[in-house]
Image (spheres, grey):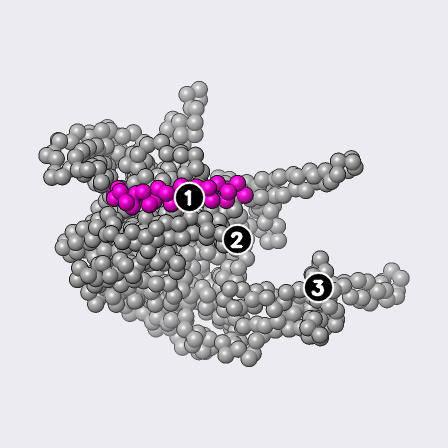
Amino acid sequence: MEDAHSLKDFLDCYGPSLAKRVNDELEVIHDPLNDEAGDMDGILDNLNKRPFPVQKEVIKGVVKSFKSGNRSVYITAEMGSGKTLMGIASALLLKKRPRVLIMCPPHLVRKWIKEIRETFSISKIFNLNGKHCLSILEGLRSPKPGTLPEFYVIGRERAKTSFQWRPAVTKRRSENYCPKCGGLLLDKDGVPLPVFEKNTQGKYKKKYECLNMITKWVWDPETNTHKSIQRKCGEQLWQPDTDNHKYRKYMPAMFIKNKLRNFFDVLIADEIHQYRNLSGQGFAFGILSSVCKYTLGLTGTLMGGYAMDLFYLIYRTHPEVMLGDDNQWNNPTGFMNKYGVLERVTIISEEDGLTVKSKKRTIVKAKPGVSPLLMGKMLLSNSVFLRLSDMSENLPEYEEEVIELKMNNQQGEAYKSFEDDMKQALREALAVGDNSLLGSYLNALLSYPDRIYQGVTVYHPRTHALVAFGPSISDEMPKERELLQIIDTEISNGRKVLVYIQNSNTTDISPRLVKMIAGKGYRVKVLRSGDTERRSEKIDKWVSNGLDVMICNPRLVETGLDLLSFPAIVFYQCGYSTYTLRQASRRSWRITQKDPVKVYYLTYSETMQTRAMKLIATKLEISLALEGELTDKGLSALSESSDSMTRELARALLEQISFSGSLKDMWAAYRKKEVQVNCNVYDTKPVELKEGELPVNVEKMSVEAEQIGDKVVKVSFIEYVGRRKKVTRIEVKESELDQMIKESDGPITLQLAMF
Ligand SMILES: [Zn+2]
């Protein structure tokens, strides 16, 4: 014990014996290493789309868990590990002709339908996401005996959508009165209730109820008389909007609950973590889960770092477990007390210093952190965990290149003076802790180098005072030249290119990029937000019509979409969200991808862009070190703290913090950490590499390689003549496994077991 100083030391020290103890003592429902192959293997091998060996074990574990009496199971698997296929296959193994209800994000409805067709073509598939949803459901009330597996796919928005509503009050002299008690409608501070207030989409903002206190006569058994009491009127001040043409009588989830109870054998809830709160879709999910025999939840991230993220979710899937553990539905704080981290801040404010009686106020805030007890009590017996690295042999090679470009002198000077102007504004925004201001200033700084052809003027959003002016310079920019070179190389190798930009309405640079790329004769398209459901279909159509380059904001493709057609991805603008960057960089690195994947990050050196990349690398490395893996959970918690990202970036600029080390070192450190975590090996061994000839117009080049577990991480750093371009290339390759097995004296462990 004396030599374990940190958690990592402790784990390094005692990890193996602890793991052995767990292995020996834990009873598992499915043990891939020992359990015989059964009839399930036969069925799985007959699917049109065969699962990979690791996926098969997960599917078998899920089905055995259901058969052992578990009503709901979660598959927590990293993106790209084939959750959809595992979900479909599990349902097909559960029953000969199952009726499966799939609830998924709206832009994935068509992907699910396509995947079902590809996995098991002799099945009936119904799209419940259209306006005929209710009539299709109505038709199921007198079901014919099932002859084939039936899949019903509904978007989460559609499932929860019920009738449109509008305010219901009595108007007199432009004042609003309660239609029931006739009282004037005021809030607790005596301000008129804003019942007709609308949100940005023009929809009525909030359903109100009457707060007036009214006299009520109640029977008093003690005095055997009626007595008057004061009670809140509580009349609802809204009604169904029957005039609206979109009026809809029934919430599909409620219809299924009332009319189709136990009709569906399995509910598959995709991205189940999105049903973790008291929202309409969470409510709809809870209803559906309660009237389907089994519930299978698919997610890449079960919890976003807070215990609270699991409270409503587990209550909806495993109410008996929650009640058994004495957690009341209306007492989430009690649950947080047990399994989460709560911060209690007591503020004692002395009014005027004269009175001894001081006012005390306690604020309770939920903080990131989950007790491991929760894992043991609630999750281990109900979940399967799968990491992409568990399937690394089925994954194509993945390579990243971070390209730092120097702006030409004129651009550099313009940027420098723009940055100096912004500094003052950032200092003020930081001082008042105004994050929205910080965010918009930072975006201007990040995007000016890429929009220098049109110039940028920044005004204070509220005072409209001029904050900074970045003049326009019309020459071709180094990044544009670099992008065209990358596209030339990739297209000439028959690989389509996906280009990410951070475009919002005001900062959209895509028209210029489209003109430039199309000018070279390539077919290029820009994916815009809008019709989510048809997004993947639209992309497929473009690709089948010979598209070469697609440009889009990474947020549009951050969840669920497989972009296999684009093995080359270029971050033309990287932004500063770790979550989006990580998700978007792996959109085409999936087990079904056949081509090696290459991701390019373009950034201008000595600008806010490079600072942001360095900060992202640091954050990702920390998250890996802390969480022992890079689940979306750590990422989303990181990005959730985007306020902290903006503050850190602003501070970095103002205090000239240069984030110790070059971008090359920081990015390489993050990638190495990732391989260490995936291989579960922390010792690294340097690998000798023969020095090669310096390629033409390269001033300096260094290549270093390290063996980590069964992988070799090769980091090449190339500095081009005139130092106008620096490239950090990181390649992760399989090393000669059997060679390694011969060398290593211990057994090689495969990390997969079903709890
Ligand atoms: Zn009232």
Mark 2 vs mark 3: in front: 2
Can you see residue 564?
Answer: no
Task: Tell me the residue at 79%/37% (across/down).
Answer: 355
Q: Earlier in the sequence, mark 3 or mark 1?
A: 3
Q: CA distance from mark 2 to mark 1?
A: 17 Å
Whether 406 is among the magenta residues is yes
- Quadrant for the C terminus, please: top left
Q: Which residue is mark 2?
A: 463
Q: CA distance from mark 2 to mark 3?
A: 32 Å
Quarter of image, res 208: bottom right
Quarter of image, res 27: top left
Q: Residues within 10 Å of mark 3 (few under 14, many from 20)?
A: some
Q: Which residue is mark 3?
A: 186
Q: Which mark is residue 228?
A: none
- Of the residues shown, which amino acid type is indicated by label 3? Leu
Q: Main secondary structure of the magenta part?
A: helix
Closest to the observer: 274 or 297? 274
Task: Tell me the residue at 72%/38% (across/down).
Answer: 350
Q: Residues within 10 Å of mark 2 (few under 14, many from 20)?
A: few
Q: Residues within 10 Å of mark 1 (few under 14, many from 20)?
A: some
Report whether 48 appears left or right of 156. left
Q: Which residue is mark 1?
A: 421
At mark 1, the secondary structure is helix
Which region of the structure is painted magenta?
Answer: 403-432
Q: Earlier in the sequence, mark 2 or mark 3?
A: 3
At mark 2, the secondary structure is loop
Q: Position of residue 343 (x, y in %)?
A: 58, 40
Q: Earlier in the sequence, mark 2 or mark 1?
A: 1
Report whether 709 appears left or right of 65. left
